[in-house]
Amino acid sequence: MTRDLLWRHRRVLPDWLALYYEDPVEITHGEGRHVWDAAGKRYLDFFGGILTTMTAHALPEVTKAVSEQAGRIVHSSTLYLNRPMVDLAERVAQLSGIPDARVFFTTSGTEANDTALLLATTYRRSNTVLAMRNSYHGRSFGAVGVTGNRGWSPTSLSPLQTLYVHGGVRTRGPYASLDDDAFIAACVDDLEDLLGHTRPPAALIAEPVQGVGGFTSPPDGLYAAFREVLHQRGILWIADEVQTGWGRTGDHFWGWQAHGRNGPPDIMTFAKGIGNGMSIGGVVARAEIMNCLDAHSISTFGGTQITMAAGLANLTYLLEHDLQGNARRVGGMLIERLRSAAARVEHVREVRGRGLMIGIELTKPGTDEADPQAVAAVLEAAREGGLLIGKGGGHDTSALRIAPPLSLTVAEAEEGAAILERALRSIP
């Protein structure tokens, strides 16, 4: 049945629609931190639908909220008052840390980032945007235009003039040998030099932890230092929290808070985990920025009642059960467990991350050369052992991505780490 589905998939869907595994898997249902395939095999899920199943599969509180809302009304668009949308907007605005915040809901992180770029370029009257090397911001025309990762950038055409800044990857590039303070200083100098050669940009868009880039990040405080330079010139800071938001990093509720010395971002985008699988994205911005558009706009499916009900229930569960604290505790243990296992595998260049957002970079032994074949082999071996993980990385796909639901237990973390250790040791 799965082979028939794969044949049908290839006949009707685009060739560029990526599938994991030599023999792709069909996921039929899930519960907690586990999913099952069409053959009935159970897997421990360490990727959560690309960081989207944030709390748990089939979380009763969310499924109940969705079912009850579906029995009332599913959708009406933003042309009508919508109580669940206002309820969730109030909670997100308060949690964001952005003063006088306004919230606009979309259906995805891609759409959220496109909206943020629209707001920033309109507000600043400039189509020049700063972005980070190795970044990823979505698959739309505008979002691809600020994506600094060649593997996910299918065109160089763009409505934006994008200039790429150094600093998103701590352990590679010309400043990798510096200590953290010197690294930040060098990146700030690079930014100031770049700004001396261009027209005033609208904004810097940056992921506090680069997701598709392989869960890389700068030293804490880099974006705070950037903010001083940007603020002097009126340049906005857009924090892309699509993958880092809602407590996944453990230490902070938002990734930007590791760089918050000079205050919150001007604009913040979110998506993925807030819906626990439902399609929710959004933008938070200061009122003067959010309200800068001088034409009408709506969102047909952004903020629809059924997704807002899911988001409210999911956010309530997350906060009441301190899943951020769980990500910090269980994630810290998992990182140390994986570092211990990786110390005996010559292909492992680095185990990095924080909370339940962990990357393992693989290279050819004795070199810094990416080894995507090794990554593919580990993905296959982990699946065979009953564990689903992801992959990513810059230059080439050379990093394993580990991002389980935030309700992961210690026992499940140990189980997953043991499977992953066996998979890493199986690299040919």
Image (spheres, rainbow, N blue to C red):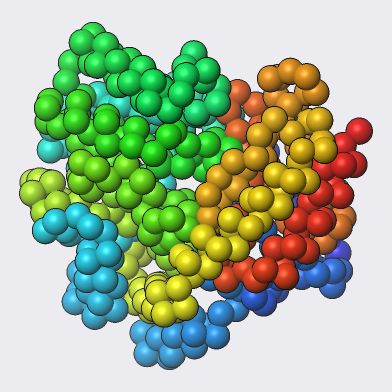
202 lies left or right of 212: left
Front residue (pair 154, 162): 162
Identify whether 373 is placed above or below 420: above
The residue at the point 29 percent across, 78 percent down is 84
118 lies left or right of 10: left
Relative image position of residue 295 (x, y in whole percent):
11, 48
Looking at the image, the residue that sits furthest to the top is 197
The residue at the point 33 percent across, 37 percent down is 221
Relative image position of residue 208 (x, y in whole percent):
40, 42
Is residue 212 visible in this depiction of the protein?
Answer: no
Front residue (pair 415, 16): 415
The residue at the point 23 percent across, 57 percent down is 97
**Location of residue 232 (image quadrant):** top left
Front residue (pair 263, 146): 263
Relative image position of residue 216 (x, y in whole percent):
52, 36
The residue at the point 32 percent across, 57 percent down is 282
Relative image position of residue 86 (x, y in whole percent):
22, 74
